[in-house]
Image: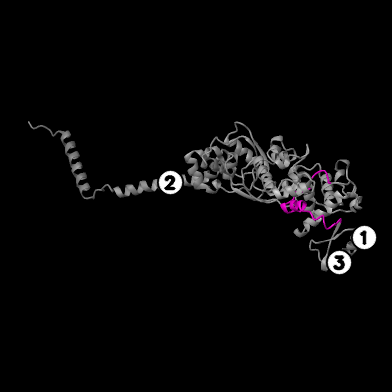
Amino acid sequence: MTRPPDPRLDLADQRNARIRRLREERQGVPRRRFQPAVLLLWFAGIIALLAVLISVGFVAFAPRLMAWVEEHPGSIEQGPVQTFVKWYRPSALADQPFSDDTTRHSITVEDGASDSDIADLLFDEGIIGNRLAFQWAVIQAGREGTLQAGTYDLSPSLKPSEIVAALRQEAGPEITVTLQEGWRLEEVVGYLRSTKLTMNMDDFVSLVEDPPADLIRDYDFLADLPKGRTLEGYLYPDTYRLDGNWDARTVLDVLLSTFGERLTNPIRNGIRRQGLSIDEAVTLASIVEREAVLDKERPKIAGVYLNRLQNPDAGTRGLLNADPTLQYALASNANRDAAPKDWGGIEWWPPLQVAGRDVELPKRLAGFQTYVNPGLPPTPIASPRALSLQAVARADTASGYYYFVAACPGGKRNGSHYFARTYEEQLANQQKANAECSS
């Protein structure tokens, strides 16, 4: 008996035939191979794109980050912050002064103040324009947390590194200052305020207006200084090279020591021969300093005043008739309420508007009216140089001059004077001088 065909076998043959056909088709198509170079390029492109996106985002964010760093200057201590600032804005760390302004600002650093507190104080006072640069200067100097409490006078013209040195009371830059002969105390103070000295000027003013007993004891030429007197006349005019960070007492010691050096033994002996104390000689020398222009005339001018003082019966009644003493008193009265910080902008030697004898002074300054009151004024009126002190010590009294008037030889003022022994000669000299000077 013949068996019928099994349908499952037909299905299997069909499936096998289909598989063989697919294999034949595949063999006719080339197979794709893996290419690593293409894959690497693909990854590199992705990384480059991410880098660009990150860089663009960081640059866009950098201003905000820099603003945060400037608001938190203490963060500059961190290495990553330093790297960022040096890359993004290196000028923020530059050791440059805020400005050329030499105006002094008195600041007081309290005990326990942090470096950031001090930076804020300096910024608020207009002494620095960048707290970050100051903080960086502290770090560069290795002075974190070591700045000292105290009162300092600082100006925007100082570099951050110089301010750090001042706040550490370390040696500072050498500063040259020149005190002019014939300056009164207020002019000296006004000038010193314009320099880069960091000493506190209030301390300096206190020392020169009310010198302590221990300072007076240090200098023998101050031994006969009347009680309550200032150091007017003793701030010796000269050019000095000072450490920018010296305190007020040290600077004053330099000025007084120089005065003592210029007050040589021959000058001291000459002052004694004139019957004067050192303070009286300084007072007279200060008037000579304001009157004399030509050095050769200083002994003659000093002789005129000494003759008037020592021979009151010679017709002068002991009156000095010295215009500079009136100028001194008038300026003192007009500016009696001026603060020391304003002294540098005041005209301290105003020309007289009326005849000397007609100048009226308040009672407290009456002693400076030398057209009315005989004798020396109560205090020196300016700082005399050694030549004026020497002129007093070697005053030409023997010539017998009691008068002098400014001359105009050839119609030009050259600082010379005409001297006279009598009032009649003085009147003739005045007429001559008036005729010359009018041309």
Examine the rendering and report whether any part of residue 131 can be seen.
no
- Residue bounds of the magenta highlight: 376-402
Q: Mark 1 or mark 2, which is nearer to you? A: 1
Q: Is residue 384 magenta?
A: yes
Say if mark 1 contacts mark 2, CB within 8 Å. no
Q: On the picture, is 190 further left or further right than 55?
A: right
Question: Where residue 217 sits in the image (x, y, percent)?
Answer: 70, 37
The local secondary structure at tag 2 comes to helix
| Residue type pointed to by label 2 | Ala
Write down the quadrant of residue 431 in the picture.
bottom right
Q: CA distance from mark 1 to mark 2?
A: 101 Å
Question: Counting residues from the N terminus, which is met first, the one under dot 1 or under dot 2?
Answer: 2
Applied colour scheme: one colour
Amino acid beneath label 3: Glu
Say which of marks 2 and 3 sits in front: 3
State the mark number for residue 51: 2
**Which residue in the protein does label 1 denote?**
424
